[in-house]
Amino acid sequence: MAAATLSPATGESSDSRPDTIEKVVHINRCAKVVKGGRRFSFSALVVAGDQQGKVGWGFGKANEVADAIKKATEASRKNMNRVHLDEATIPHEVLGEHGGGCILLKPAGPGTGIIAGGGARAVLEAAGVKDVIGKSLGSSNHANVVKATLAALGALRPKDEILRARGKEIKEKKAL
């Protein structure tokens, strides 16, 4: 497998698989103090998705930034899950929590775009959601926001499943 190279401007990869995109959400530098000075290591949080309902996250650590991103990218591709989308938006309002991170996602009309910040925006773009409103509540920790967004997307159910559970009939859309 060829190594993914990331564009410095957007943080997106130009991998050999054009159907999957990776977004670097956060890079952290850690310092270990040793006898000769400080030794630095890096960790990276990456989100990957096919923009058609599959999305995952990965975390990688290494002594170099590129190696940390590569490890995180591989982990994110192994950790991909399918989410239910309603055309370009989500079927219903949902709240996702993980640790101290909490995110509220609401469906939006066509042309609204993704109104969300940081890790939540990266997850929604990678999943292929085009119109959604998101508000991050609680902790702003990048990893917890990404995991909370994925938990929210995982809690989505299709509209027909919700209507069946309520004992309602599905009405066909009328053509104008």
Image (cartoon, grey):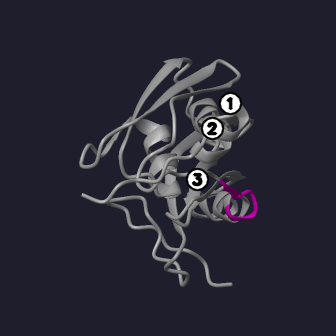
Q: Looking at the image, which residue is at 61% across and 46% down?
A: 160
The earlier-in-sequence mark between 2 and 3 is 3
Can you identify the residue that label 2 sits on?
A: 163
Frontmost residue, 102 versus 35: 102
Question: Looking at the image, do the residues carrying marks 3 and 1 touch, with CB atoms under 8 Å apart?
Answer: no
In which quadrant of the rendered image does the C terminus lie? bottom left
- Residue at image position (44%, 56%) is 87
Residue 136 against residue 69 in the figure, above or below: above
Q: Is residue 17 visible?
A: yes
Where residue 58 sits: x, y (%)?
A: 68, 52
- Horizontal side of residue 91 vs 143, given as left or right: left
Q: Which amino acid type is marked by label 1?
A: Arg
Residue topped by disc 3: 46
Left or right of 103, for residue 80: right
Residue drawn at (61%, 35%), measured in percent from left and top? 152
Badge 2: residue crowd in 10 Å (few <14, some 14–19, many ≥20): few
Instruction: Please identify the quarter of the rendering in which residue 102 is found.
Output: top right
Stretch in magenta: 77-82
Residue 80 within the magenta-colored segment of the rendering: yes
Horizontally, residue 82 falls left or right of residue 109, namely right
Mark 1 burial class by Cα count in 10 Å: few <14, some 14-19, many 20+: few
* Residue 145, quarter of the rendered image: top right
Residue at which label 1 appears: 166
As measured in the structure, the alpha-carbon distance from the residue carrying label 3 to the one carrying label 1 is 38 Å
Amino acid at pointer 2: Leu
Residue at the location (43% across, 37% down)?
Answer: 118
Residue 72 vs 16, above or below: the answer is above
Q: Is residue 111 above or below residue 4?
A: above
> Which comes before the other along the chain, label 3 or label 1?
3
Residue 84: give x, y in percent of width and height: 60, 51
The alpha-carbon separation of the residues under discs 2 and 1 comes to 5 Å
Please tell me how crowded label 3 is: few (under 14), some (14-19), or many (20+) other residues with Cα within 10 Å. many
